Image (cartoon, helix red, strand yellow):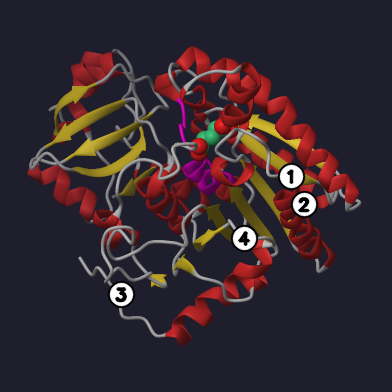
Amino acid sequence: MRPAPSRSSAAGDEARQAFHRAGRLVVKVGSALLVDPSGAVRREWLATLVADLAALVARGCRPVVVSSGAIALGARRLGLKAGGRASLEDAQAAAAVGQIRLAGLWAELLADRGLEAAQILVTLGDFEDRRHWLNASATLDRLLQLGVVPILNENDSVATEEIRFGDNDRLAARVAQAARADAVVLLSDVDGLYTADPAGDPTARLIAVVDDPAAVAGLAGAGSGSGLGSGGMAAKIEAARIAAVSGIPLAIASGRPAHPLARFLDGGPATLFTAPQAAPARKAWLLGRMRVAGRLHVDAGAHAALRAGRSLLAAGIVACEGEFRRGDAVDVVGDDGAAVARGLVAYDRAEVERIRGLRTEAQAAVLGYAPRSAVIHRDQMVLL
Ligand code: GLU
């Protein structure tokens, strides 16, 4: 690990250029910024952010907003304890009440600047299913062409615990992939990523530029600092990873002061995650997925073949887990127990159980039909 990447401020300036040049910019706003600890909306502050967004639009940039705050807002209106997060039922009820207010607030403040708002609520499943994903992507595209500012949030009122994003940081990264955005800014109640906890360690330094999110994963303390949102630093670093696979740089910047976006673009404190290389879109979508339906354990020979860029054949599979169906995403696990690849499987689990360990010539007799060319074709697979 490289806890304090020694990048010069020149590298930081260069990395920040990507945000200035962005034609499409995803801006995520955390709950703690929108709602104060008593549950009241920080309306004046939000008006300054909307002014920043309007300035971006005026110079041709198309912002996409991912806004948290529904649960916190709804909890206050309903008088629910623990900010509405005492139980899933509370959070779902609070979100339903809060979301309508939140959307109204954004629509009203954007209208004050002559901008039209659109609301899109998504669940994790919407982005894991390729058809829904392409649909969401097309809708975002059309809205942006029309000059509308999309406001997204998770559909917390219907998502069950197992199929939730749970935090808007990773949602923002997925939205950026879907919107084919050029950069993401996570406005948060912290300035960025520190080398240690700044509250307890006077030597803690803000890390200006990170080239590899995996190298800083150890610096994330779990959970949300404010207790209002649910992200925390781990979710932000994971968001940076998801964005990076699509070649999208991501910044974590403090949203507390007025005009937070302008302040960030003017060089305010932040941690910038660079994204030097983009995987092809379909592979990036696969890598950004948050759920897999199963795991295929493979032998050393198959592992080596995958590394060499070949497809996964049944002969190298030693065991399977999970009730996956044809077309589901599964992880491929090497003989050391670590996931080595992820891909869309060409068979249901029952079929894989029948053909695993068999060479292609022997499979037809077991299946009763001609086997497919691979269990996971290399075009449907990414190495991890
Ligand atoms: N979707 C949640 C809300 O609107 C926020 C999730 C998060 O804290 O990141 O309240």
Disc 4 or 2, which lies upstream in sequence? 2
Q: How much space separates mark 4 and mark 3, taking CA atoms?
A: 27 Å
Q: Find out whether the residues at labels 1 and 4 contact each other: C-beta distance under 8 Å.
A: no
Percent from the top left, x then y, of residue 81? 49, 20
Disc 1 or 3, which lies upstream in sequence? 3
Using the rendered view, name the quadrant where residue 134 is placed: top right
Residue hosting label 1: 43
Disc 2 or 3, which lies upstream in sequence? 3
Residue hosting label 2: 47
Q: How much space separates mark 4 and mark 2, taking CA atoms?
A: 12 Å
Who's the residue at 55% across and 46% down the image? 172
Label 4 C-beta lies within 8 Å of the nearest ligand 1 atom: no
Task: Specify the amino acid type for callout 3.
Answer: Pro
Residue hosting label 3: 5
Residue 165 seen in the figure: yes
Task: Specify the amino acid type for callout 4.
Answer: Pro
Residue hosting label 4: 257
Answer whether residue 277 is magenta in the image: no
Indicate whether 233 appears above or below 261: above
Q: Find out whether the residues at labels 2 and 1 contact each other: C-beta distance under 8 Å.
A: yes
**Magenta residue span:** 164-175
Graded by Cα atoms within 10 Å as few (under 14), some (14 to 19) or many (20 or more), the crowding at tag 2 reads many
Q: How much space separates mark 2 and mark 3, taking CA atoms?
A: 36 Å
Percent from the top left, x then y, of residue 331? 28, 36
Indicate whether 187 appears above or below 151: below
Residue 132 seen in the figure: no
Determine whether the residue tagged by mark 3 lies in a helix, strand or loop.
loop
Determine whether the residue tagged by mark 1 lies in a helix, strand or loop.
helix
- Quarter of the image that includes the N terminus: bottom left
In the foreground, 232 or 65? 232
Who's the residue at 59% across and 38% down the image? 68
Disc 1 or 4, which lies upstream in sequence? 1
